[in-house]
Amino acid sequence: MFSIQTLLVLVIPLILTASGCRWAASGQNTIGARLYQQGQYSAALQQFQKVIATDPDNADGYYNLAATNHRLGIEQKDQKMLNQAEALYNQCLDHSPNHVECHRGLAVLLIDTGRPDRAFALMKNWANQNPNFSEPRIELARLYEEANNPELALQYLEDAVQKDASNSRAWLALGRLRERSGDYSQAIQNYQRSLAINNQQPQAWERLASLNRQFAGRSSNPAAQNTTRIAAPGSPYGGGFNVRY
């Protein structure tokens, strides 16, 4: 069963991307993100509202504004803010139908507000509409993992890497899931595959080094197989209310 506390930690990060010559909106997004990171949420809201006023087609502006309302709505138990967040997530998707972070944010909000069936339907419809796009499968796997259904999560991640073998995030998530299931040898291969695609992944390097140390220890001491686990791997999907520029 999902808990609001867990999902609050795992809700997607705010994102910022430059969009052509829309420098004013991009600058406002940057300022808003910095205010958000500093915990100045009301000021961040004002900046994200300026983004939309400056550039009404800026999907990231709608997303950032939605995510801020979402967080405040959960923390303050404010249904009006949650309703506003939902409307803004949908506006983001109107402007950018394949906005990954926005799909994630809306799905989490639906779960936060007691509508998990709609969250899964949202992701499945997105996947069906984009049969060759791996990201919906990764996000579906994420939801199933959070719902304590690692078997279905594994199926969607395997499908994701079949759709796009160059998706480092999918390989990282697959490695983490296999590590958690105790399939360490396969996890190592998945982490290596992820790093071969994108070597700028500190988390993947950390997990690979940890597994290599553990693997070496178990090879000389079979009885230690279930007792030498270091720290459980963190989420490979991205999490927390962080800003990705």
Image (spheres, rainbow, N blue to C red):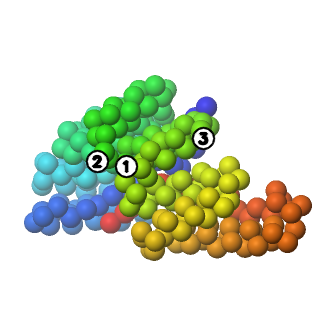
Amino acid at pointer 3? Pro
Q: Which residue is mark 3?
A: 150
Q: Which residue is mark 1?
A: 163
Amino acid at pointer 1? Lys
Q: Residue 114 bears which disc, if any? A: none
Q: Nearer the viewer, mark 1 or mark 3?
A: 1
Q: Earlier in the sequence, mark 1 or mark 3?
A: 3
Q: Which structural element holds mark 3?
A: helix
Question: Would residue 79 be visible to someone looking at this image?
Answer: no
Q: Which residue is mark 2?
A: 99
In the image, residue 64 sits, relative to residue 218, either above or below, namely above
Q: Position of residue 43 (x, y in %)?
A: 32, 56
Q: Earlier in the sequence, mark 2 or mark 3?
A: 2
Query: Is 75 left, or right, of 69 in this rendering?
Result: right
Graded by Cα atoms within 10 Å as few (under 14), some (14 to 19) or many (20 or more), the crowding at tag 2 reads: some
How far apart marks 2 and 1 lie (CA) works out to 18 Å
Query: 132 or 203: which is nearer to us?
Result: 132
Q: Position of residue 189 (x, y in %)?
A: 57, 64
Q: Nearer the viewer, mark 2 or mark 3?
A: 3
Asked where in the image residue 234 lies, by quadrant, the reply is: bottom right
